[in-house]
Amino acid sequence: MAQHALSTCTLCEAACGIVVTHHEGQVERIVGDEKDPQSLGYICPKAIALADLHHDPDRLRRPLVRANRDEPFREATWAEALRLAGEQLANVQHTHGRDALAVYYGNPVAHNLGLLTHGLAFTRALRTRNLYSASSADQFPQMLASERMYGHFGLIPVPDIDRTQYLLVIGANPIVSNGSIMTAPDMRRRIQDLRARGGRLVVLDPRRTETAELADEHHFVRPGTDAFVLASMLHVLVQEGRVRLGPLGPITDGVHAVGRALLPFSPDATASQTGLSAEVVTRLARDFASQSSSVAYGRLGLCTQEHGTLASWLLQLLNLFAGRLDAVGGAMFTKPAFDLLGLLERVGVGQGFDRWRTRVRGLREIAGESPVATLADEIETPGRGQVRALLTIAGNPVLSAPNGQRLDRALRGLDFVVCVDSYLNETTRHANVILPPVSQLERGHYDLALQVFAVRNGAKYSPPVLQKSPGSLHDWEILTHLSAWLLLPKHTPESLRTATLSAALKVTPEHILDAGLRAGPYKLTLDSLRKNPHGIDLGALTPRLPSILGTPRKRIRAAPPRCLSELSRLAVTVHDLEPASDALLLVGRRHLRSNNSWLHNSHRLVKGPERCVLLVHPEDALRRGITDKSLATVKSRVGEVRVRCALTDEIMKGVVSLPHGWGHTHAGLRMGVAQAHAGVSLNDLTDDLQLDRLSGTAGFSAVAVVVSPASQQDPPVLPSEAPHE
């Protein structure tokens, strides 16, 4: 008889409730859980595809090993694979120093209870400065702005979307992402509710996105100029006496310093940079400040540009100066049931900025991590501290990091590579050992990270839907096994190593979750969540400042010196215009059926019209002799791709767009569906030298490219090949 299990989708930040029907280990149906207090029955196509991922014949079930990467992989026992991985990685650190081992973990870590409770502590315990994550490819600027202003990287306010009357969206597409650093299932319904109560949605973006299609106003903005737009809006508030700090005034420092620094950024001065007229910017600033409630929200487009940290800080200032920070209907802080930020601090995550610089390019450390844009430098450059081995955890940097072709070449030169991953993909094909964890449906789940950014307080635990297969391991168990080799002295007796490992494996993610819930503000327990399998609604967001601030004397720092300095640097360029050229500005985009690079092996998610196409404005296409559905060659400083074009006026003139996460063209993959819908990689074009100055985040937006027609007979431009099976 079929069984029905309540669970949570772990494929994006919405964390929607689902009901999974299964029988004898086979998933028969997945639908939305109408009683989930957050998602109310909503799901997107990704949730249904959880079944595809679980049953995918290409998903690895057993470890793969090879002593030499010129050899084919072979299946191995867990004992053999874990011993080989642990001994070799430990040997690299013992021989060449701690920094010779690099670690990269991808954004699935944020959707994985065990990797949050065990994985982050493990990676920090390795004490390597070559620690990298997807954060430096998408969110470091927002983290850094919050740390500078509020005293902690994780204190990022989220829009009180359900109570605001005016939502300003800059460089974000929440209809597709369902929020990002904003856990908000069914954003379409939430925006419709905003409109129904008389509210307004305004979108600033170089593309008329799915969110912009629902907006009361959409204005094209030149990529990479969001800092100019926000500085001009703040200029209007300051010059017109519209700054209203409200109850935060007595605890805020630096307001006058910011006002002086904003003087060069009048709407007239920035119009030529941004493409937004002075009249529009002035009106938007006045509208934002005059509403009964309003909130500004920016995300990936705001972060992934040369002025990402500056733009993120200015966005926070817009909410602060208009009296919208920590206010109902404004930008508020969630009160999670589990204090993840406290846990991260205890294991060394979330503290520190610029305590050291990277060895080759001198980029700043943030929260113990280095920017992934410099990983190839650290591998290729000889000397003390050179990266010689790599451990990846749920990450695919060959497709996610800038200048992916260079990183792909660099990985071939490593002495040893270990990957904790379910697929033989663009990055793991370089591995000596691949250690595959259980599927998403075989592990218990609680959204430790996503509840920190939820638009409504809540708590929910989902037990495993399916029992894990005999002989399989959770990812946290895999890392615990590796820790017995990497965190114990080299000559530890085997008996002591075994005893230490046995004791460590007894501390499960659920043990840590229960302890954290009991210590949290609502005094919940894991048992209480098990008795409420749909989840517990803990109420709307409430003001929390100044008690949660991590700054000295619990004060808001409106004018962090580094941000002010960067704003002064930007002011020098406020009247500059780039010389005329044939270049277009490349931006990325995301689709509802996609999530970075790791959902393209589901036929359900890739079927239908081709989505990896280059969006080109008709006028730009005409000048270059490009027609709809024709092939074009796109060249940047670092590489080129050949891709099919789609002509549309949804993209701003002078701008082109490719989706992120495609490019499954490498030799040696074991992902049949993805290879049949390969597309091209945006990051074969993005530039690893084009960075946000403060955070080192890659400037994926506003990459200068030259687009020209490509003959149908020309061979496709493919990444250079590497040893494979």
Image: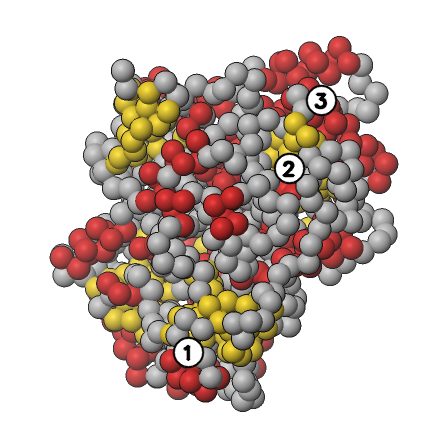
Percent position of residue 150, x then y: 47, 51
Residue type, mark 1 in image: Thr
State which quadrant residue 479 falls in.
top right
Label 1: which residue?
A: 627
Residue for point 30% across, 33% down = 30
Q: CA distance from mark 1 to mark 3?
A: 55 Å
Residue 649 seen in the current view: yes
Q: Is residue 192 above or below residue 338?
A: below
Q: Which mark is residue 419?
A: 2
Label count reads 3
Q: Earlier in the sequence, mark 2 or mark 1?
A: 2
- Name which residue lies at 22% across and 38% down: 40
Q: Neighbour class for label 3 at 10 Å: few (<14), some, many (≥20)?
A: few
Q: Nearer the viewer, residue 149 or 640?
A: 640
Q: Which residue is mark 3?
A: 80
Q: Residues within 10 Å of mark 2 (few under 14, many from 20)?
A: many
